[in-house]
Image (cartoon, rainbow, N blue to C red):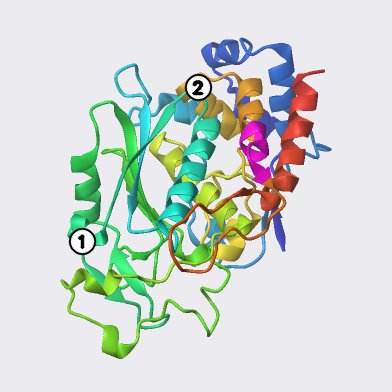
């Protein structure tokens, strides 16, 4: 294992900048907020630690990128900022997210609520779900995993762009069907056009059984249709909605929307905005932002840092229950009690409470 550790001065400059105007802007945070963000360069901090690399296949090793500090983010002429006219995040479900209508509806409501807390100050709206056929996208069966995949560029991004409302800052498609960006690639977790403010993200690989030999989503040879017969998606397999799947989905959705705000992959500290090449690496990423990326997002949206953390705690606490599995057996839609499965968020909640303790001293 390798640790990516930066000096205190490097982290201080990445967060605060040496530009007098940006230093002055930083000093407008109140003393408590600065005390929290200054944890970024406190060597003994137990809130924000260094990035750890576990193999050569990890993102930073295999995809070298220039780091983006706050000053570079602030001066980026291509980054997009919400405005009074364009201040909403829209979520478009493509296909079902669960094996009953109720599960699918509840799941996307949980994602909506999470995004509203994470991007505190913006409104998140749900669009009516659409079947895969509505996007007219290409699809295939993966030769290796034998599961259905939809093409993540071209038609599907064009479809989302056409669906994007006038008041949208961005529109993101979410699906339980695996994605591929081009024929030569095995898969991709998501794809976005930052210029157009659109993205498509899949949670298919976040179910506990995706990589098992008994995965139920494999498509038999007799079921494989032509590349334009969308009936293959009728009653396609969706994984059980567990706490871990919800946590992974929240991570991916906020990471990718973060890119639409202009946040590049973080190379400073352990952070949600780190890149990931595989599920194990994605699981190591924390759920929230390091102080450098938090300042970037706060600059874009203008939220109060304490209120945002409090909103995230409320999302975890609201209608939660110590129930690890919420998916009833596939049968019929009825009045099913679906408590939000948040036990996987427990450690993160404790971390947020530590952050709040610092700013509320």
Residue 254 in sight here? no
Residue count near mark 2 (Cα–Cα under 10 Å), binned few <14, some 14–19, many ≥20: some
Indicate the quadrant where residue 30 lies: top right
Residue 155 in sight here? yes
Tell me the residue that label 1 is attached to. 133
Tell me the residue that label 2 is attached to. 299
**Residue placed most toward the observer, 152 or 110:** 110
Question: Is 123 left or right of 11, judged from the image as shown?
Answer: left
Question: Is 224 left or right of 322, judged from the image as shown?
Answer: left
Q: Where is residue 199 in the image (x, y as percent from the top left)?
A: 34, 47
Numbered disc 2: secondary structure: helix
Q: What stretch is highlighted in magenta?
A: 313-320
What is the spatial separation of the Cα atoms under label 2 and label 1, in whole angstroms? Answer: 39 Å
Q: In the picture shown, does residue 47 fall above or below 298? A: below
Q: Nearer the viewer, mark 2 or mark 1?
A: 1
**Residue placed most toward the observer, 227 or 188:** 227
Q: Where is residue 45 in the image (x, y as percent from the top left)?
A: 80, 37
Residue 38 among magenta residues: no
State the residue at coordinates (72%, 35%). 352
Question: Is 322 left or right of 175, judged from the image as shown?
Answer: right
State the residue at coordinates (46%, 79%). 216
State the residue at coordinates (58%, 69%). 208
Numbered disc 1: secondary structure: helix
């Amino acid at each position: 294992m390798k640790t990516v550790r930066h000096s205190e001065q490097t982290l201080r400059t990445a967060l605060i900048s040496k530009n007098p105007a940006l230093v002055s802007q930083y000093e407008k945070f109140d003393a408590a907020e600065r005390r929290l963000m200054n944890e970024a360069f406190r060597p003994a901090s137990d809130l924000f630690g260094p990035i750890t690399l576990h193999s050569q296949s990890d993102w930073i090793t295999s995809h070298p990128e220039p780091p983006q500090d706050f000053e570079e983010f602030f001066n980026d002429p291509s980054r997009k900022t919400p405005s009074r006219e364009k201040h909403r995040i829209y979520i478009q479900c493509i296909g079902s997210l669960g094996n009953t209508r109720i599960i699918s509806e509840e799941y996307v409501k949980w994602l909506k609520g999470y995004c509203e807390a994470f991007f505190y100050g913006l409104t998140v709206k749900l669009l009516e779900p659409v079947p895969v056929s509505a996007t007219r996208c290409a699809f295939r069966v993966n030769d290796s995993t034998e599961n259905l995949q939809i093409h993540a560029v071209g038609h599907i991004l064009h479809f989302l762009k056409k669906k994007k409302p006038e008041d949208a800052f961005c529109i993101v498609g979410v699906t339980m069907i695996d994605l591929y960006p081009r024929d030569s690639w095995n898969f991709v977790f998501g794809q976005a056009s930052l210029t157009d403010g659109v993205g498509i993200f899949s949670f298919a690989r976040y179910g506990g059984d995706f990589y098992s030999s008994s995965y139920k989503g494999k498509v038999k040879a007799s079921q494989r249709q032509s590349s334009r017969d969308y009936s293959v998606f009728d009653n396609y397999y969706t994984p059980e909605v567990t706490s871990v799947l919800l946590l992974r989905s929240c991570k991916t959705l906020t990471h990718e929307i973060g890119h639409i705000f202009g946040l590049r992959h973080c190379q400073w500290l352990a952070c949600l905005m780190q890149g990931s090449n595989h599920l194990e690496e994605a699981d190591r990423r924390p759920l929230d932002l390091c102080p450098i990326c938090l300042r970037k997002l706060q600059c874009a949206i203008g939220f109060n840092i304490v209120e945002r953390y409090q909103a995230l705690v409320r999302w975890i606490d609201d209608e939660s229950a110590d129930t690890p599995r919420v998916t009833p057996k596939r049968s019929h839609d009825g009045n099913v009690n679906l408590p939000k499965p948040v036990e996987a968020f427990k450690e993160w909640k404790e971390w947020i409470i530590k952050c709040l303790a610092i700013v509320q001293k």
